[in-house]
Amino acid sequence: MEILKTLYDEVIGFLGIGNAWDILQTGDYSVLTTYEGITAFIVPLIPLLVLLEFILGLVYKKPDTKVYKVNFLIYVFNRFVGRFIAIAMVVLLIGWLQPYAPFQTSATWYWFIYGYIVWEFGHFLYHYWGHKVRLFWCLHSTHHAPENMNLSVTYAHFFLEAPYADTVRTTVCILAGLEPTMLFAIMFIDGTYGAFIHVGENMIKDARFGALGKFILTPSHHRVHHAKNPLYMDTNFCNLLNVWDHVFGTYQEEERKEKIRYGITRKMDSGNFMDVYFGEFAALAKDVWNAPGLKNKIAYIFMPPGWSHTGEHQTAKMVRKEYMEEQTV
Ligand SMILES: [Zn+2]
Ligand SMILES: [Zn+2]
């Protein structure tokens, strides 16, 4: 019976419906005007959508079982480790760095806009390095392994990625003077939206969202980010506002003639938890081991994926550039 109770608590925990359920039972809806009240009903949105999308997949007979299976295993694994380290990092960093901020912002709407743009910059940095520094790519590649898109991809992360991401984002935000409550509010909005942009074709076929796509990052933009087509490689690093992709020249729209192929370029088994989770570490270890001299060994750790000591580089930047040149001739 103990096991059933634990399982029940885990399901309620995954769905995040505990707080909403309490509110429904008390019948006191006045709490809906509070932060806690609102989050109680927003938190369950993504898990419920994951379930709905999975059911739609079954209806269309395209449930992407392999992706769901591995992402579920990853969710279970991270559930017990990653989140706690990330929360501890955020709390520590706020304490350490706040005294060094040149000024402090307050909780007003204009500082909120400022805060969001700063947060997006932190997100851009963490995400860009996650693609351009081989060691960080080891942390991030788990998220890019799935070969089709659905909301369960939201849970596909190596357990140390959240601490790494939150370290970069929190450092940027706190040094830029963001107030911790504002930081947490932005984190929450961004986390929820960041989950939603993984909605798959089974639920929303065309996710360009018309003119809205000019101002915000749509699921279509994020599908492009998850693609291994040369044209799409290493583009769209932002999360909700794609301002920094425009600034740094990494913005790319989904082209109708270029059908998205999801996944990473390394030969791998996306249905194998060990390969999805540790495959890039194994590949890096092999390259470091085989590289001649200490300088080359260190270079493998910090240079972009695809860098080679022989000079025969196959980085995303080069592959994309070659492709663009082929297109113009
Ligand atoms: Zn990425
Ligand atoms: Zn993603």
Image (cartoon, rainbow, N blue to C red):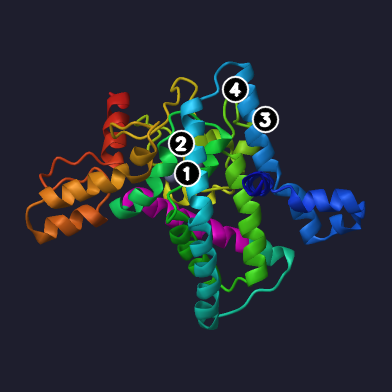
Q: Is residue 126 magenta?
A: yes
Would you place residue 206 above or below residue 170 in this image? above
Q: Is residue 162 visible?
A: yes
Specify start and end residues of the magenta stretch as a single range: 114-132
**Amino acid, disc 1:** Ile
Q: Which mark is residue 57?
A: 4
Percent across and percent down for residue 38 are 78, 54
**Which residue is identified by label 2?**
70
Which one is earlier in the sequence, the residue at label 1 or at label 4? 4
**Which residue is identified by label 3?**
52
Percent across and percent down for residue 37 are 81, 56
- Assign the C terminus to one quadrant of the image: top left
Find out if the beta carbon at label 1 lies less than 8 Å from the nearest ligand 2 atom.
no
- Tell me if 109 is positioned left or right of 94 in this view: right
Are the residues tagged 3 and 2 within 8 Å (C-beta)? Answer: no
Are the residues tagged 4 and 2 within 8 Å (C-beta)? Answer: no
Disc 3 secondary structure class:
helix
Would you place residue 322 above or below residue 119 in this image? above
- Tell me if 125 is positioned left or right of 118 in this view: left
